[in-house]
Image (cartoon, helix red, strand yellow):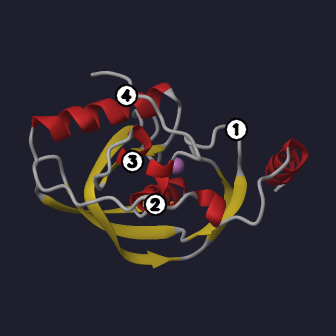
Amino acid sequence: MALRNILKEGDETLSKRCRPVTEFNDRLHTLLDDMAETMLNAEGVGLAAPQVGVLRRAVVVLETNVPEGEDDRVIELVNPQILEADGEQEDPEGCLSVPGSYGLVKRPYHVKVRAQDRNGQTIELEGEGLTARAFCHEIDHLDGHLFTELCDHILSDEELQAYYDKKERQ
Ligand code: CO
C-alpha cells in the first residue's frame, strides 16, 4: 500500500466526470488499498478516485457508526449509485481536496446505495448521518462536483466555532 497525492481544488481533474470501472483486477485493488490508506492518513471520512487523479467511479468511505468497542470500517464502493434518499441534515462539510474549509451543506439523513465490491459483486448498503453525507459527497466527486458548489459560503473560523458551540449546548 502507498499514500497517494490528493489533488486540490482548482485542479481540473476534480471537475471531470469519471468513467465506470470495468475491470476488477489487481490494479483496482491496489487503487482501493491506496485510497483507504490515503484517507486514513489524512484523517478523512471519504475519498474518491478522482481526488488521487484516477477518473474512474470508485470511492472509499469510513463507516463511523459502529458498535461501541469496534473499529471504524472502510467501505469500498465501485460504480456506486444512490437508490433511495430520505430525511435531511445540515452540518458543516469539508473535503480533503479543500483543506481547512467548511460550509453548511444539506444532505439526506439516510441513503441506500447500490455498488459493486472490488471483485465486481453487486452490493447494497445503507448509511445514515455522517455516513450518508459521505456517500453523497463522494458520489458527487465522481460527477466532477465539490461541496463548495452546494454551500452558500465557506464558514469563517468564528462561524464554525459558533456552530459547534451551539451544537454542544443542544
Ligand atoms: Co471531497
Provide the residue designation for mark 2. Answer: 144
Measured in 3D between alpha carbons, the distance from the residue under mark 3 to the one under mark 2, in whole angstroms, is: 8 Å
- Of callouts 3 and 2, the N-terminal one: 3
Asked whether residue 11 appears in the rendered view, the answer is yes
Quarter of the rendering containing residue 57:
bottom left
Relative placement, left or right, of 119 versus 43 is left
Provide the residue designation for mark 1. Answer: 100
Pick the residue in front: 164 or 17.
Answer: 17
User: Which label sits on residue 37?
Assistant: 4
Point out residue 139 in the picture as x, y percentages from the top left corner: 41, 61
Point out residue 5 in the picture as x, y percentages from the top left corner: 44, 29
Identify the residue at image location x=41%, y=64%.
Answer: 143
Residue type at mark 1?
A: Gly
Determine the secondary structure under disc 1: loop
Tag 4–tag 3 contact (CB < 8 Å): no
Tag 3–tag 2 contact (CB < 8 Å): yes
Quarter of the rendering containing residue 18:
bottom left
For mark 1, does the 10 Å Cα neighbourhood hold few (<14), some (14 to 19), or many (20 or more) residues? Answer: few
Specify the quadrant that holds the N terminus: top left
Whether 147 is drawn above or below 101: the answer is below
- Of callouts 2 and 1, the N-terminal one: 1
Residue type at mark 3?
A: Pro
Measured in 3D between alpha carbons, the distance from the residue under mark 1 to the one under mark 3, in whole angstroms, is: 20 Å
User: Which label sits on residue 50?
Assistant: 3
Determine the secondary structure under disc 2: loop
- Of callouts 4 and 3, the N-terminal one: 4
Of circles 2 and 1, the one toward us is 2
Identify the residue at image location x=38%, y=62%.
Answer: 17
Of circles 1 and 4, the one toward us is 1
Measured in 3D between alpha carbons, the distance from the residue under mark 2 to the one under mark 1, in whole angstroms, is: 20 Å
